[in-house]
Each structure stands twice: as C-alpha cells, then as structure tokens.
Amino acid sequence: MNNASALQQLGDTQRKLLRTLLSRPQGATIEDLCGALRISHNAVRQHLTALRARGFIEQGEAIASGGRPRAMYVLQPAGHDLFPRNYALLAQGMVEYLYAHGGVSAVQTMLSELGARLGLQAASRLAAARDAAQATRLLAEQLDALGYEAEVSQSDGHAEVQAWNCVFHALARAHPDVCRFDLAFMAQATGRSVQRTACMLHGQPACRFRLGEMDSGKQR
C-alpha cells in the first residue's frame, strides 16, 4: 500500500490529528488536540494509542505547565511519509540528469519555465481574486489541492501562504534551485510578485510566501 492509500485508510479524525501534528513540529499536548479536533480527552488518547502503535507519532518531551508536566506528541518520519510527495524519485532523476548534461543555468531556466507554464494553467482559478488577500486564500487552496498542506496565516499584519508539506522537499535539499519552480508557479498563477519569507531548507518548520502587487504586464 502506498503512502497516500495508507493515509486514506485512516479515519477522518486520525487524518486530522496527523495534519495537526504536521503543522506543529514542536508537538502538541492532549489539550491542544482536544481543541483542534473538538473531541474528548478519552477519544484523543484512543487515537494517539492507535497511531503510536503504527509508528506514526510518538510522545516527546513533556512541558512544564505550572503543575504536572504535560506530555507532548510529535509526528514521526513514518507519519510525515504518509503525506504525498508524488513523483519525487522521477523528478530527482530528471533534475540530476539535466545538471550533468546542461549545467546549472539550464536547470534554473527549465524550472522557472515549467513553473510558469503550470501556473498559467492555474491562473483561471485565481482570476476572480479582487485583492492580494483573496489571491492569497485562493492560492493556498490551489497549493493544498496539489499536496502542499497549505493554509493562510498572518505575519506582521500580512496574509501569507504557509505550506507545511513541500512536495519537492527531499529534492530541494540536494538541489535548492528547485524552489524556482514554486516561485514561478505562484507568480504566474496570481499575476503578482511573490516573496518567500520562510523556507524549510533554512530550518523553518514551513515555507511561507507573501503576495505583492499585480504585475503591470499581467493585469486581468
């Protein structure tokens, strides 16, 4: 069974629990999970026991709470692997081949052009955006559908797209140029400038992107 199928085999609550832990790399307490899932302590404990038995999560270091320390639960590598990163092996082979036969410049050009081409296909779904805030929401929905586990978050008074599950993360660790694809895709899809404000490659728990002004050459 592949990872995507294994994730779908879990119940809705367990999938939501795993996604909650995916978005909280530092871990979450039972109380945190009760609030996120809106279920009882006993129900959370039952789901935690089942997911621990399969190696998807584990109990981390307890945190002080002014009284009895509270246990934290964290997602394990097997849990991370449940979330889709489709075609990673094929993409890595193609990029490494192009590096060997075309050089860095060829790889950068290919990634930017490919991202822009696919972004153009997505542009019709974002054309209804009236402003940067709505474009950010629509872009997050589009990326989430592609497996990025994306959502809108606020930072310094600005709406940003926050992606917890970069589909190219393993490839980007070896070849950071791969990030050009994401930036080109988002810029073309939204018709706006895109600023990357955080990156998992630099140790942040998620990648974050902020949309700017409309490109004067792409006014809709």
Image (spheres, helix red, strand yellow):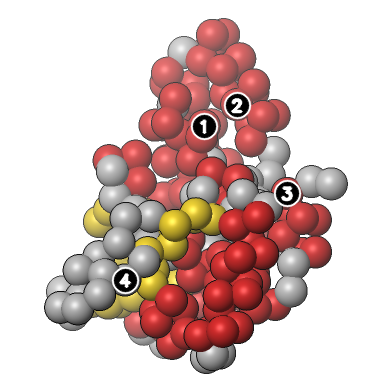
- Of mark 1 and mark 3, the one earlier in the sequence is 3
Image position of 1 (left or right of 120): right
Secondary element at image label 1: helix
Q: Of tags 3 and 4, which is closer to the observer?
A: 4
Label 3: few (<14), some (14–19) or many (≥20) C-alpha neighbours in 10 Å: some
* Quarter of the rendering containing residue 100: top right
Amino acid type assigned to the residue bearing label 3 in the image: Asn
Give SS at disc 3.
helix
Badge number at residue 3: 3
Residue at left offset 72%, top offset 60%: 7
Drawn side of residue 170 relative to residue 63, left or right: right
Task: Point out residue 144 in the picture as x, y percentages from the top left corner.
Answer: 57, 66
The tag earlier along the polypeptide, 3 or 4, is 3
- For badge 4, the amino acid type reads Arg
- The residue labelled by disc 4 is 70
Q: What amino acid is found at the position of numbered circle 2 in the picture?
A: Gln
The residue carrying mark 2 is: 92
Res 187 visible: no
Q: Which mark is residue 171?
A: 1
Between disc 2 and disc 3, the foreground one is 3
Dot placed on the residue nearer the N-terminal end, 1 or 2: 2
Q: CA distance from mark 1 to mark 3?
A: 18 Å
80 or 49: which is nearer to us? 49
Please give the name of the residue rendered at 56% of the width and 50% of the height, measured from the top-left corner. 80
Decide: marks 1, 2 in contact (CB < 8 A)? yes
Indicate which label's residue lies in the foreground, 1 or 3.
Answer: 3
Looking at the image, the residue that sits furthest to the front is 68
Mark 2 or mark 4, which is nearer to you? 4
